[in-house]
């Protein structure tokens, strides 16, 4: 376990809360707040539940779209241990998530040797995914 003596102070004085939270290890989160990793809740759903919902919804989008793909490797050949990447998009940009290897078969999409090269120019936010899906649907109706 890392030294937790300054973590609460870091959080209380942080102006960049996202950066402050990412500095805390899962083990420290459990020790400081007595909440198991992934079980932080808004009162209705835990993060674990929400990530499962996100995976299911993203798999429905991907499994019904010819522009979806998955790969065990990033464009540079790297990957996080026991994870793969799934994405959807075209030359205008793509939207992707990393998932644990246990969920590989949930995504019945094109298997690529390498994911497309990532850059801020091609990384689309959720709004971009919605626009992409709208564009595909409009083209399909023509």
Image: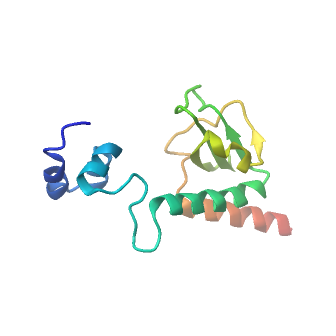
Instruction: Locate residue 81, reporting x and y percent.
Output: 53, 31
Q: Residue at x 14, y 45 (%)?
A: 6
Horizontally, residue 57 falls left or right of residue 32, namely right
In the image, residue 73 sits, relative to residue 124, either above or below, namely above
Q: In which quadrant will I find the C terminus?
A: bottom right
> Quick check: 54 above or below 97?
below
Q: Residue at x 77, y 48 (%)?
A: 108
Residue 105 in the image: above or below residue 77: below
Q: Nearer the viewer, residue 99 or 32?
A: 32
Can the viewer see residue 122 in this picture?
A: yes
Q: Quadrant of residue 138?
A: bottom right
Of residues 22 and 124, the one nearer the viewer is 22
Instruction: Examine the image and state in which quarter residue 78 appears.
Output: top right
Residue at the image point whose x is 18% and y is 38% from the top: 3
Q: Is residue 78 left or right of residue 3?
A: right
Q: Quadrant of residue 15?
A: bottom left
Taking the view exactly as shown, the residue that stands out farthest to the bottom is: 44
Q: Is residue 11 left or right of residue 105?
A: left
């Amino acid at each position: 376990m890392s030294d937790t003596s300054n973590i609460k102070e870091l959080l209380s004085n942080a102006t960049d809360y996202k950066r402050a939270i990412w500095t805390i290890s899962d083990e420290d989160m459990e020790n400081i707040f007595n909440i198991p990793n992934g079980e932080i809740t808004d009162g209705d759903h835990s993060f674990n539940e929400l990530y499962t919902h996100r995976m299911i919804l993203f798999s429905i989008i991907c499994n019904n779209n010819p522009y979806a793909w998955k790969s065990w490797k990033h464009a540079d050949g790297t990957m996080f241990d026991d994870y793969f990447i799934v994405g959807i998009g075209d030359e205008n940009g793509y939207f992707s998530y990393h998932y644990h290897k246990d969920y590989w078969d949930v995504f019945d999409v094109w298997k690529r040797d390498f994911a497309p090269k990532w850059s801020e120019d091609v990384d689309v936010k959720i709004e971009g995914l919605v626009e992409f899906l709208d564009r595909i649907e409009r083209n399909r109706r023509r």
